[in-house]
Image (cartoon, helix red, strand yellow):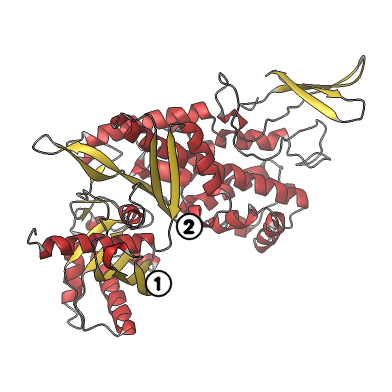
């Protein structure tokens, strides 16, 4: 029986309306049509999706906005019954993706233990959650100013020219260009990668007419680094010899051998830290950064004792993508998650990220669809070579399918592009699959943020903690309901914390410029 299945007695009012009262969690439901006349149905009535999120021991005054109750009747010959409700077999497959509040609290508890272990580590090999000390001791103080070159590297490359204005005025993006980073370069050699980056910098400077200027550079790098060196490749970056190499030194070497342009000093910063710095430039209460895009990560300001025993704030890059790589999330991983790990995605690596991020979300939905087809629950049991092809179902498809007005029409359009001939019922099921996967992602992010906000509040001995989270990434920014689901869940998991979210375009680039600006101030004051 699916977790969360409940029993209802449904009474008919004189006016024909139906009233439902929950009285237990036994299998089956009873409709009392009239006195002495009952119909027993050997099926389940499902609660609203994620209604188990609230603690059963407390009065349910606050609930997550959810999809309508699914009422299943036995004897349905297809995916849906005659009223358009998903049947129990489909819900049984989706149920493991629906995490209760108790489960999310347990995940938060395990994450906190991993974070505390990471803060106490002697070396990175001892822990899965690295908790990297970034040496950023303050968010922006609005005194940084000047023109800065920015290089942002993720699965693709963005080069920007950013002007930081006096007295904390809004940062101005004076130029910006995006460049594709070919997959073979991400899997090639160190020399190939940095030669490409140097070429992109030259092409941008030339397009802006500033190739003769020697500007300071902020390098926003979306991969785990410590003390300037990359720890390991993630999100498709598979160049083993790059590990433990100094990133800035490699970039400077690639630029020097060209002899057609140069840069001033360069500073390296993780993209999530840069995102936090960008938002703190405008909101000084911002102490947390969150990325939910191709990957996921978070950073926050932690109070640590320095060598003199004095507490000071320092930004910690959690690198929480690897949470669960030691097996602590195995009881929350579904069979679909385990199947994903059998694919060429660095098996048993980046466990938390695979359950959340956009790089894997579409593939998880696709694996569920194939499972439903194999069990004759979708597309009349028929599939196509295109659907079975890796990366055929894009995460962007999820964003389109979950739109309120045109979601089902988009589902039909997308499925037909995969060679399928979906019925309206098929489209409704696919939409529910997308909802289950993306909502799990949002709720896991909420559990992670609750861990961080509750830790900061407890460390400071506060009754309530008010803060702002700087957030960036395509999943958060483009999914029509992700941010709402995340924020509603966070309110339940961290009720003593008032959290605002500040999504900002180009935040990691602007933040990298701010970090470069802080470095410039130190150099001008002779502190470097």
Q: Secondary structure at mark 1?
A: strand
Residue at screen point 21% across, 33% down:
120
Q: Earlier in the sequence, mark 1 or mark 2?
A: 1
Residue nearest the observer in this picture, 517 or 274 = 517
- In the rendering, at what x and y percent does residue 293 appear? 45, 54
| Quarter residue 316 falls in | top left
Q: Which mark is residue 178?
A: 1
Residue nearest the observer in this picture, 484 or 367 = 484
Residue nearest the observer in this picture, 57 or 115 = 57
- In the rendering, at what x and y percent does residue 500 appear? 45, 46
Q: Quadrant of the N terminus?
A: top right
Residue nearest the observer in this picture, 412 or 304 = 304
Q: Quadrant of the C terminus?
A: bottom left
Q: 60 left or right of 30?
A: left
Compared to residue 464, the image places residue 130 above or below, namely: below
Residue at screen point 54% across, 52% down:
362
Q: Which mark is residue 414?
A: none
Q: Secondary structure at mark 2?
A: helix
Let me know if residue 364 appears in the view. no
Number of residues whose C-alpha sits closer than 10 Å to that of mark 1, classed few (under 14), some (14–19) or many (20 or more): few
| Quarter residue 5 falls in | top right
Compared to residue 217, the image places residue 528 above or below, namely: above
Number of residues whose C-alpha sits closer than 10 Å to that of mark 2, classed few (under 14), some (14–19) or many (20 or more): some
| Quarter residue 519 falls in | bottom left
Query: Circle 2 sits on which residue?
Result: 474
- In the rendering, at what x and y percent does residue 248 appear? 19, 63
């Amino acid at each position: 029986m699916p977790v969360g299945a409940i029993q209802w007695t449904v009474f008919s009012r004189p006016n024909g309306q139906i009233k439902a009262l929950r009285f237990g969690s036994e299998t089956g439901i009873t409709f009392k049509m009239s006195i002495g006349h009952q119909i027993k149905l050997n099926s389940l009535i499902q609660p609203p999706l994620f209604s188990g999120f609230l603690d059963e021991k407390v009065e349910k005054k606050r609930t997550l906005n959810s999809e309508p109750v699914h009422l299943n009747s036995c004897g349905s010959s297809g995916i849906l019954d005659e009223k358009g409700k998903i049947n129990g077999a489909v819900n049984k497959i989706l149920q493991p993706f629906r995490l209760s509040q108790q489960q999310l609290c347990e995940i938060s508890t395990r994450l906190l233990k991993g974070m505390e272990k990471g803060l106490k580590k002697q070396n990175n090999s001892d822990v899965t959650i690295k908790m990297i000390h970034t040496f950023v001791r303050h968010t922006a103080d609005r005194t940084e100013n000047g023109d800065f070159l920015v290089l942002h590297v993720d699965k693709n490359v963005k080069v920007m020219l950013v002007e930081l204005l006096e007295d904390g005025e809004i940062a101005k993006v004076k130029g910006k260009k995006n460049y594709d980073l070919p997959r073979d370069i991400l899997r090639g050699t160190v020399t190939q990668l940095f030669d490409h980056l140097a070429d992109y910098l030259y092409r941008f400077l030339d397009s802006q007419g500033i190739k003769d200027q020697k500007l300071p550079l902020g390098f926003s790098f979306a991969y785990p680094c410590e003390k300037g060196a990359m720890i390991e490749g993630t999100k498709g970056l598979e160049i083993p010899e790059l590990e433990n190499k100094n990133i800035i030194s490699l970039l400077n070497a690639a630029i020097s051998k060209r002899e057609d342009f140069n840069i001033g000093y360069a500073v390296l910063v993780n993209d999530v830290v840069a995102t936090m710095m960008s938002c703190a430039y405008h909101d000084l209460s911002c102490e947390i950064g969150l990325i939910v895009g191709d990957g996921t990560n978070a950073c926050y300001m932690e109070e640590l004792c320095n060598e003199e025993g004095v507490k000071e704030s320092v930004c910690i890059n959690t690198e929480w993508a690897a949470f669960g790589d030691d097996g602590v999330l195995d009881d929350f991983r579904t069979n679909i998650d385990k199947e994903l790990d059998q694919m060429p995605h660095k098996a048993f690596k980046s466990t938390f990220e695979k359950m959340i991020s956009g790089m894997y979300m579409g593939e998880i939905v696709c694996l569920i669809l194939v499972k439903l087809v194999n069990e004759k629950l979708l597309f009349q049991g028929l599939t196509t070579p295109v659907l079975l092809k890796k990366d055929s179902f894009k995460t962007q498809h999820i964003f389109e399918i979950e739109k309120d007005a045109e979601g089902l029409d988009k589902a039909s359009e997308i499925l037909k592009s995969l060679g399928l001939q979906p019925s309206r019922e098929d489209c409704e099921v696919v939409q529910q699959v997308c909802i289950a996967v993306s909502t799990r992602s949002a709720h896991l992010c909420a559990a992670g943020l609750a861990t961080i906000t509750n830790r900061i509040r407890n460390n400071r001995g506060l009754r309530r903690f008010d803060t702002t989270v700087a957030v960036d990434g395509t999943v958060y920014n483009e999914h029509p309901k992700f941010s709402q689901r995340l924020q509603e869940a966070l309110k339940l998991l961290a009720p003593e914390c008032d959290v605002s979210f500040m999504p900002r375009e180009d935040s990691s680039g602007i933040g990298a410029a701010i970090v470069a600006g802080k470095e410039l101030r130190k150099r001008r004051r002779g502190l470097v």
